[in-house]
Image (cartoon, helix red, strand yellow):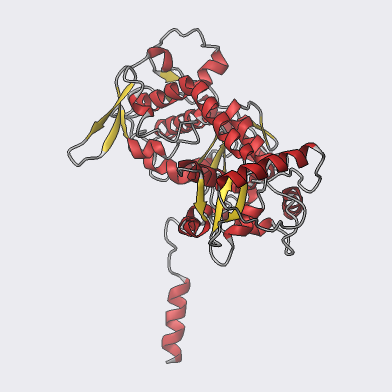
Amino acid sequence: MRRMWYQQTMFGWFQIKPMTSSRRVQDRSKNKRIHYLEIVKEKWKILSKVLFLMELLKKEKEMVIPLRSLDRYRKQLNLPKPHKITDFIRKCPNLFELYKDQRGTLWCGMTKGAEDLLEEEERLIEEQSTKAVEYVTRILMMSVDKRIQLDKIAHFRRDFGLPIEFRTKWVNQYPQHFRVEKSKDGVEFLELVNWDPAWAITELEKRTLGLNDGIGREPGILSLPFPLKFPPNYKKVYRHGGKIEHFQKRSYLSPYADAKELKAGSLEFDKRAVAVMHELLSFTIEKRLVTDHLTHFRRELVMPQKLMRLLLKHFGIFYVSERGKRFSVFLTEAYEGSELIEKCPLVLWKEKVLSLIGYRGKKKEVPTFSDLSDMEERDIIEEKDIIEGDTEMEDTCADFEEEEIMGGLDAVSPTNDDELEISHFCNSYKGTS
């Protein structure tokens, strides 16, 4: 038995390892972590919950909803039990309010300020609609079949500044650019109607070559280097400098050119995929996207199956944040530290909402109202208190995304639940870097 055990052990030692040993994304990117972009990811985390709740209330007839009805939306709010939804709402008193009816049922509604913010967002989306139409059209122009499933584009609704009624109303307002077609299976596709040569120019070409004259050009081979930005503490850039220079000098096919003949896995295929990703991220208002949404476009946009590996490989052009359940990819050139270099009006609007999240002070007792007119009366009283210098509420900094990490708001709130100061969290996160 000893001899058999010895032989089996020796055989195990001399076994050849598999050719590919995949490692987790967290392990592979650990030494390339850009901490100020990680803070950006955390900063917008809570805002995603707030925006979801605001949109949910907006759909209600009186813009109020029974608190027990919010329990079904715990997954979207990322508030698993035993976290209390009431605690989350109380931490945003400038946007939401709780009240009881005569039967003792607890309701949630929006403040007058939150309703005004939603009206402002509608106006801004309408003002930015021309640009949104262009970007959606250009995505269709980059696709192989010049059409993409409507549900897939809907994933990017907020990223491209599209309205809530994107699928039901918005897509039918621009028949000169695209139309909705149904397949035999009943699946809806957004299909390109008109190819615009002036839009077949990449954002990189516009910035590098100054091609903003609106004159159409035939998409073909490009030789433009991608802007690179590495963290100050990343020293491997000197070791891999030759490979980076070789990649930057390599020609590639324009994202708008026909890529059906490209061989998957070739150097030309991979560089074109980088160009497509660069173009997509340039379209977004925050220059970042959730990576699992991107995987839906691999076939339509001719991108590799192992898209995450491509993004991690080209660190310096892109940065993948792996915090939470859903990873995000950033366009590094668009950020200076943790701030966007160019902020569109919708980003500034989000920052305004962000500044209204959080409070310092004791919890207020939930009032009882006999009807909605009493609520309006209370709004007048509260506005008077604010004008007279009520210091009980203070604006603080809090968080977005889309991007769903369990327990987000409760994870940054102090144990006594009397104070929410997200800047404390940001500082503590920096300390752990």
Q: Is residue 362 left or right of residue 169?
A: right
Residue closer to the observer: 201 or 347: 347
User: Would you say residue 97 is visible in this rendering?
Assistant: yes
Q: Is residue 160 left or right of residue 95?
A: left
| Residue pictured at 35% horizontal, 28% vertical | 171
Q: Quadrant of the N terminus?
A: bottom left
Q: Residue 50, percent across and down?
A: 58, 46
Q: Which residue is the extreme one toward the left? A: 184
Judge whether 133 appears above or below 241 on screen. Answer: above
Q: Residue 303, percent across and down?
A: 39, 37
Q: Is residue 219 left or right of residue 118?
A: left
Q: Is residue 147 left or right of residue 409?
A: left
User: Would you say residue 47 is visible in this rendering?
Assistant: no
Residue closer to the observer: 117 or 183: 117
Judge whether 51 appears above or below 201 on screen. Answer: below
**Quarter of the image where one finds residue 220:** top left
Residue closer to the observer: 420 or 293: 420
Residue closer to the observer: 49 or 189: 49
Q: Residue 53, percent across and down?
A: 53, 47
